[in-house]
Image (tube, rainbow, N blue to C red):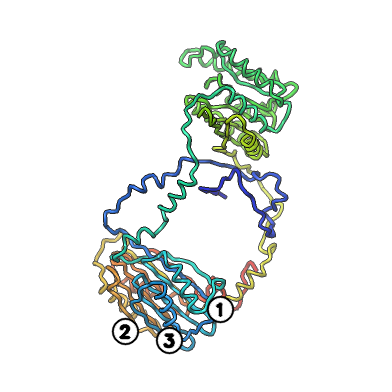
Amino acid sequence: MVMGSRTVDFMNPTLTEHGTSNLVVRNLATIEDDFDLYHDYAYNATSYHLCDNFSDKNNDGTQVRSPGIMLVVEAEDVTGDLSIDSLKRSLTSALKKEGFNIIASDAVQTDSNAITYITLKEGFVIARAMAESKYVGFDIHFWSAMHKQEAAQNALVAAVGGKRSALSTYRVITGGMFGIATWEEEDKFRGPQFEEMCHAIKETAPVVNLNEGDVSQIDLNIVMEEALKVSNGQNLKVAMLVGNSVSTNDITEKHRATLVRYESVKEVVPMNCPSMADFNEFSEKAGEVFTACEKHLYEMFVENTHESRFSIIIIDSTADKVTSSILLKLFAARRKKFVAKTLEEDVIVMSAIVDNEDERWKRNLMSLFKDEVFVDEPAAFAEVLFENSKTNSEFKLLLTNDGGLHFINNLNSTLAEFNKNNSNNLAGRILNIDGGEWLYQKNFVPSRSYVPDDYDQSGPLAQWKTQNPTGHQFVVQLEPNPKVRPQLTITDELVMKATVDAITTTKLSGLDASALTQFSDLGEGSLLVALWDGGSLSILWDGREHVDVNLFTYIEDVNVGDTFVKELLRRLPSFTTMLRDEQPRGTGRIVAYQRDLKGNAEPHWA
C-alpha cells in the first residue's frame, strides 16, 4: 500500500480507533509500534510546482476542449406523484427555481412507467419513473454550469419526494458542446480547481529555509548524542572511522573524547589506515595500499571484538571517501560471518553531512551499507535534516540500521522528544527512509487465510437480494479513429441521418425514427432525443469530433446496444468506439445485471 498527502504528516499521525470488528487489521490497543508496517518514507517540501506558473497562463481565446459530465442518480422510496403530467411539471419547475434555462421538454407513459426529457441551455435531463417501485432514475448530462450539477440533482430528487439517504449516484465523464457563449467562464470551473487548490497549497506548504550559516561542532555533538538513543541501548561500543592524516589527530581526539562522555557509550575505538595518508590512486602501488588498508581494518575489528561486538559505527567528519569505501567493501565481501562476528544484530551506522562536497558520497556510502551489507528488512537507510533557527545553519544526519525491528519508531520518538525539549534552537525532520529488501519466505504458509465466511455477510447479502434491475443502459463515446484518414466532415445533418438509419436497421422495439427530436441551436453541435415505451435514446454531437450515445432499454439485451452502435458507426466513416460504459439501472442500490440475479442465485461470497 502506497499513500501520499499534501497535509498529513505520516511520521506524526493521529491514529483513530473506528470501533469496527477487524480480523486482519489490529485494534489500536494491541499495537505497540505505530510504525512497524512502514517500509519507505519520503518528505518532499520542494515538489509544489503545479502553481509555479499558474497565474501566468493566458487563454488565447480559442476553445480546444468541451467536456461534459453525466450524473447518474437512482432515487428510491420516493413519495411524489409520478404520473406523466405531474412528473414533467414538477421537474421543470424545480429546475427553473434553480436558475436553469428550459428550452423544451416532452414525456411518454406506458402502464405505470413514465419517461420525460428536459432540454436545457446547460445540458439535458432524462428521468424514468416507476410508480409501483417508488423509483425515479435520472441522467443529468451537463456541458455547462457543471458546478451546479449537484444543485440540479438535489432539486430534482426533492421534486419527486426523494431523500438523500435513499440515493445512489455516480458520474460518467462524457463529451460536451462547443460554441456556447459562456465557455471561457465555464472553463474556470472544469476539472481540478487550480486557483483554489494553489491557494490551499500556499497556505499549507512547508517552509523551505535557505540555511547558509556555519554549522557548529556543538550542534553536531548534541545531535550525535541524541542519535545514539535510537539504538535504545546502554554500554554502547562505538567504532569510529577517522582521518588517516596526522594533521587530523587533534580533531579526532576531541570527537572521541566527546563520545566517551556520553552516558550511553561504554567504549569508543578510533579506526583508520595510516598507510592511506598520502594515497595516490594513480600510483603503481595503489592496489597494494588499498589491500593493506582493508586488511588493517579487518584486523582492528577482529582484535576489538573478542569480548563484545560493536553496536555503532560512526563515519567521522575527518574520514575520507576512499577509506570509507574500503570499510564498506570489507563488510560487503564478508557480509555473513564477519558481520555477525563483529557487529551487533541491531547495529547502526551513522554519519553527518555538513557541506555539499561530502553529501553525495556519504549518502551513497550509507545507502550501500543498507543494500550490500545489511540487505534484508528490517534494514533501513534514513536521512534526517537538522536546522538551527538562530544561526540559520543546517546539516543532515544519515543512519543505516541492520536488524532493529523498531528502528523507525525509535528514530521518530527520539526525534519527537528532541524537538519537544529543544533548548538549543535545533529542530529535526525526517526526510527519507529507504527500507531493505523484502524478506522472501520460500514455501510460505500463512498462519491463517481469511475468506468471506470469516466476515459477517448478512448485511451485504440482504442488500444483494433487494436488487431489482429494471433497465439496461449503454453510454458509448465515439471519436475519429486516429489510424484512419477522415472521409467525411461531420455535420448535424449527417448525425441525424446516421441515427435515423441506425434506428431503422436495428429495429429497436417500439421506436420509430419519427420520435427523434433535434436541437441544433445549443452550440456548434446538436442533440437528438427520442422517448418510446421501450426506453430512451440521446445522441449528443459536440460540434467537432465527439459523439455521445446514451441508450436505455427496459429489457436487458447486450446485442441491442452493440448492434445500434455498430450500425451508427457504419454511417459515420472513420469514427470508432473510444469508451463504452454498460450498467444496470433499477432499485435496491443496483450493481448487478439481470443475468447475474437470474434464478435468485446467491453470490459466491455469501
Residue 194 in the image: x percent, y percent? 41, 53
Q: Earlier in the sequence, mark 1 or mark 2?
A: 1
Tell which of 31 and 395 is nearer to you. Answer: 395
Q: Counting other residues with Cα less than 10 Å from the Cα at mark 1, is it few (<14), some (14-19), or many (20 or more)?
A: some
Q: Is residue 172 above or below residue 200?
A: below
Quarter occupied by residue 350: top right
Q: Judging from the image, what secondary structure is the residue with disc 2 in?
A: helix
Q: Which residue is mark 1?
A: 77
**Residue found at x 66% / y 33%:** 230
> Answer yes or no: do the residues labelled 1 and 2 have beta carbons within 8 Å?
no
> Answer yes or no: do the residues labelled 2 and 3 have beta carbons within 8 Å?
no
Marks 1 and 2 sit apart, C-alpha to C-alpha, by 35 Å
Nearer the viewer's eye, disc 2 or disc 3?
Answer: 3
Q: Earlier in the sequence, mark 2 or mark 3?
A: 3
- Amino acid type of the residue tagged 2 in the rendering: Ser
Q: Which mark is residue 153?
A: none
Marks 3 and 1 sit apart, C-alpha to C-alpha, by 20 Å
- Amino acid type of the residue tagged 3 in the rendering: Asp
Residue 503 in the image: x percent, y percent? 34, 79
Q: Which residue is mark 2?
A: 514
Tell which of 172 and 43 is nearer to you. Answer: 43
Q: Judging from the image, what secondary structure is the residue with disc 1 in?
A: loop
Is residue 225 among the parts visible in the rendering? yes
Q: Which residue is mark 3?
A: 85
Is residue 594 among the parts visible in the rendering? no
Q: Is residue 24 above or below residue 210?
A: below
Q: Judging from the image, what secondary structure is the residue with disc 3 in?
A: helix
150 relative to 496 in the view: left or right: right
Quarter occupied by residue 60: bottom left
> Answer yes or no: do the residues labelled 3 and 1 have beta carbons within 8 Å?
no
